[in-house]
Image (cartoon, grey):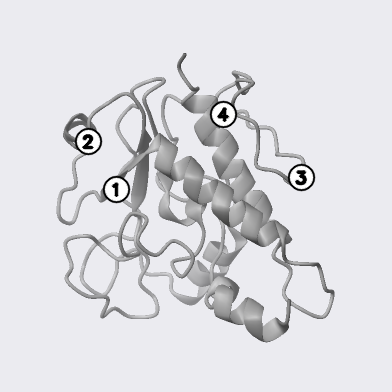
């Protein structure tokens, strides 16, 4: 695939950093095989019950560099760049991830909403602004139950519910698309992005195992 085609497919990848994820220790059910052509999925070894701290939950070099350039803890609209930790998960039914765990905004259009706060009508913000948006992947619970457990409160929390099956379909599609891009040392390396999405998929299947 040509460089131009790659750029058109993923126009904002060069601007996005990726967070580290974790999941519980259970093995993946046999029915939850990774998409065809997937490389070895990283092992996941953190509790599914609760995210420790705000997003991002692990080392995130681009965020560290960004923080050095824009050290203020608040956004231009007065909101905090890092919100309080998420409530405890409903084990086996919900797992809270970060918006960036699903790829850059240009990739996930229409998945869970914009990268900025859901209570804002538009994205007119400053380059230094960062939005601690959480995605609640859920299974065997209603959206109303999820919203009650993880409410969105202006200026305090922004949770986006996402059904488990829809999350996995999205991840499988994007992982497959990235897998079809032949590696080229002279072009952008999409390998880290693909591995990040594979890791996100593993977190979901580990924490929300498919029920018989």
Task: Check contact, mark 4 vs mark 1: CB within 8 A.
Answer: no
Q: Residues within 10 Å of mark 2 (few under 14, many from 20)?
A: some
Q: Secondary structure at mark 4?
A: loop
Residue pictured at 39% horizontal, 80% vertical: 127
Q: Residues within 10 Å of mark 4 (few under 14, many from 20)?
A: some
Task: Check contact, mark 3 vs mark 4: CB within 8 A.
Answer: no
Q: CA distance from mark 3 to mark 1?
A: 29 Å
Q: Secondary structure at mark 3?
A: loop
Q: CA distance from mark 2 to mark 1?
A: 10 Å
Residue pictured at 73% horizontal, 76% vertical: 1
Q: CA distance from mark 2 to mark 3?
A: 33 Å
N-terminal label among 3 and 4: 3
N-terminal label among 3 and 1: 3
Determine if residue 19 is in view: no
Q: Determine whether, in the image, residue 112 is placed left or right of residue 18.
A: left
75 or 26: which is nearer to us? 26
Task: Check contact, mark 2 vs mark 1: CB within 8 A.
Answer: no
N-terminal label among 2 and 1: 2
Q: Determine whether, in the image, residue 184 is placed left or right of residue 209.
A: right
Q: Which residue is mark 1?
A: 160
Q: Position of residue 158 (x, y in %)?
A: 25, 51
Q: Which residue is mark 4?
A: 46
Q: Which mark is residue 143?
A: 2
Above or below, comparing residue 171 to residue 79 in the picture:
above
- Give the image quarter of residue 129: bottom left
């Amino acid at each position: 695939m040509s460089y131009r085609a790659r750029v058109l497919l993923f126009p904002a990848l060069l601007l996005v950093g990726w967070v580290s994820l974790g999941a519980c220790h259970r093995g993946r059910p046999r029915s939850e095989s990774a998409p065809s052509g997937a490389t070895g999925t990283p092992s996941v070894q953190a509790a599914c019950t609760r995210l420790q701290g705000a997003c991002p939950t692990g080392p995130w070099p681009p965020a560290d560099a960004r923080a050095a350039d824009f050290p203020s803890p608040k956004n231009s609209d007065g909101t905090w760049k890092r919100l309080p930790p998420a409530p405890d998960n409903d084990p086996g039914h919900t797992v809270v991830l970060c918006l960036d765990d699903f790829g850059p905004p240009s990739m996930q259009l229409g998945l869970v909403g914009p990268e900025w706060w859901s209570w804002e009508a538009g994205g007119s913000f400053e380059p230094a602004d960062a939005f601690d948006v959480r995605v609640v992947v859920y299974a065997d619970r209603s959206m109303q139950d999820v919203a009650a457990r993880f409410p969105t409160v202006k200026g305090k929390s922004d949770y986006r519910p996402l059904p488990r099956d829809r999350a996995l379909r999205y991840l499988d599609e994007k992982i497959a698309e990235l897998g079809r891009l032949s590696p080229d040392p002279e072009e952008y390396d999409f390998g880290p992005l693909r591995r990040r999405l594979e890791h996100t998929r593993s977190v979901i299947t580990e924490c929300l195992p498919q029920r018989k």
